Amino acid sequence: MTGDGEARGWGWVAHLRSGGTTPWAAWQTPAPTADQAGRYLPGAQQLELLRRLNLVGRPTSALTERVLTTSAPGRGRPDLGLVGVLDASRFGPPPVDPADLPDAELVRVATSLIAEDVRAGEPPAARPARLLRRRYRVLGDPELARPVREALIADRRPPGGRSAVVVVTGTDLATMLVHVWTARSFGAGARPWPEWISSEVRRAGLLPGIDLAAVADQWSGRVGAQRVHVLLGDPRPAVRLAGARRVRPRLLELSAEAVELARRTGPVLGSLVGPERRTLLMWHRLRPVLAATDGPALVVPARHRARLLEQSDDLRRRLAAGDYAVHGDLPDPSQQTGVTAPDEGRVLALAMRLLLDAPLAVPETEAGEDT
């Protein structure tokens, strides 16, 4: 580490702390005062993220310090040094010009901060169950089934029971594939969308959860076909089939970038809390905030449409052959407008918006203890 370079680096840190936006390569201001320097310079990712935040808004002093002191997540992926401050070494990554960093590197730092904010909140407490005349199970498309289950549980109507009415929810295969990836992004995790969808459309059969006929056949053998309903399209009538009338499921639609940000945040949050709490916080804390943001929806690339049409015809035939009730018609793979992959620049913009607007922030006294 060179003395002049380190002094220049601390001068840039002071500039960014005060809301400055000058890129590192253009920074020529003399060294800072003694009280503006520290022991270790922040990493290039943290400094560039702060500069970008300064460009689009006014980060609070608390957020500024959080950005500068956080670590980018990822095993074996250290914070990067500033070119001109650190000399190149045979060990570790070389120093960089922060402006040359890809957006994905800045998103990595942002997800650490977002995960901390998500952890600080509390998912809703479970309410005592009540005795019900009709038991139920809602299965199928995870993005259609889960809101129905959540609404019924909130009404103190837990799923299960030997004589349960089984409702299998679904829609067109293209949308259900997006829904599966979305649900996994908010749950245990998922591979990047382009890689995941290319793999899934090549599989011999449908994914187990969205093979609606297979699910309906399986449960017909358990509870009898007369207790099984396949519900295609709007999942809200499922609450009536489950024996409720006034329950209103809350269906939250998400942009491609919102789901991608959730996918990148989930593993970081998973390093802070247990799996069950992570899922609850992702679903009840992060998801509503992301659903309130705008952006194009994710769609399956058109090159996969022929394959999905074949699978749709096969699924339609198998549904017609069952003895259970089928409500509605299985649509062909949708031709909805949207994007075929999340855009890294828009993901970064969304992450910065969450940090600057602080919709996830809670007072310290309200933050719950981890379990």
Image (spheres, rainbow, N blue to C red):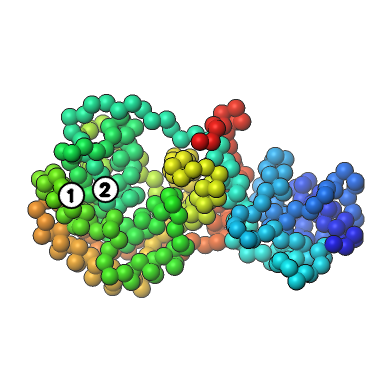
Residue drawn at x 58%, y 54% as measured from the top left: 349
Quadrant position of residue 280: top left
Residue drawn at x 81%, y 64% as measured from the top left: 86
How far across and down, in percent of the image, does residue 102 sit? 63, 64
Q: Callout 1 environment at 10 Å: few (<14), some (14 to 19), or many (20+)? A: many
Q: Is residue 244 above or below residue 71?
A: above
Which element is circle 1 on? helix
Q: Would residue 288 be found to the left or right of residue 63 on screen?
A: left
Please state which of residues 24 and 272 is positioned toward the viewer in this rendering. 272
| Amino acid type assigned to the residue bearing label 1 in the image | Trp
How far across and down, in percent of the image, does residue 171 sit? 26, 55
How far across and down, in percent of the image, does residue 258 sit? 48, 52
Of the image marks 2 and 1, the number of the one nearer the N terminus: 2
Residue drawn at x 21%, y 29% as measured from the top left: 132
Q: Which residue is mark 2?
A: 139
Question: Residue 35, can we see it?
Answer: yes
Q: Which residue is mark 1?
A: 219
Measured in 3D between alpha carbons, the distance from the residue under mark 2 to the one under mark 1, in whole angstroms, is 10 Å
| Amino acid type assigned to the residue bearing label 2 in the image | Leu
Residue drawn at x 19%, y 57% as measured from the top left: 213
